[in-house]
Amino acid sequence: MILPLDPLARPGSARRFRCTVHGVCFENRYQHLDEVHAGDRLMLRRESDNEIGADAIQVLTSETQLLGYVPRSISRWLAPAMDAGYRPHASVVKIRSACPYYERLLIEVQVDD
């Protein structure tokens, strides 16, 4: 019997990491940054029908306001893990103001079984 490879066992995968949120500048999503603070919980949701990539993972406020997306370099391995049943949890680490939009929101992600 062949067992499927655990998506988080691949090189480059991690169960806990920090990343920035991409796409904050589109559709005025940056306006929602005033609503979140360090320590706030965020939701991660798969968006497999995304036109840019089927491995897209949305980053949303607890009120389901779209803030942006997990960077593609991460979503390429995290999306299959989510599809396999892993449940990532995210929280705000820091919101920066004097930098490009794609560096403004720093989050921490913890992946649980």
Image (spheres, grey):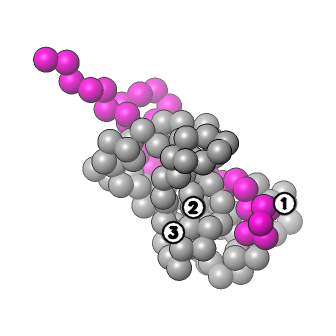
What whole-number distance in Å separates the C-alpha atoms at marks 2 and 1? 19 Å
**In the visual, does 101 lie left or right of 91?**
right
Which of 106 and 60 lies nearest the eye of the viewer? 60
Instruction: Determine the residue positioned at 51% across, 68% down.
Output: 42
Name the front one of labels 3 and 1.
3
Does residue 13 show up magenta in the picture?
yes
First-in-chain label (3 vs 2): 3
Give the residue pinned by disc 3.
Answer: 42
| Percent of width and height locating residue 102 | 76, 55
Which SS class for mark 3? strand
Residues at marks 3 and 1 touching, judged by CB atoms closer than 8 Å: no
Does residue 47 show up magenta in the picture?
no
Q: In the image, what residue type sits under mark 2?
A: Val
Residues at marks 3 and 2 touching, judged by CB atoms closer than 8 Å: yes
Instruction: Determine the residue positioned at 21% across, 24% down.
Output: 3
Among all residues in the image, which is located at the extreme left? 1
Give the residue pinned by disc 1.
Answer: 99
Which of 88 and 92 lies nearest the eye of the viewer? 88
Which of 81 and 91 lies nearest the eye of the viewer? 81
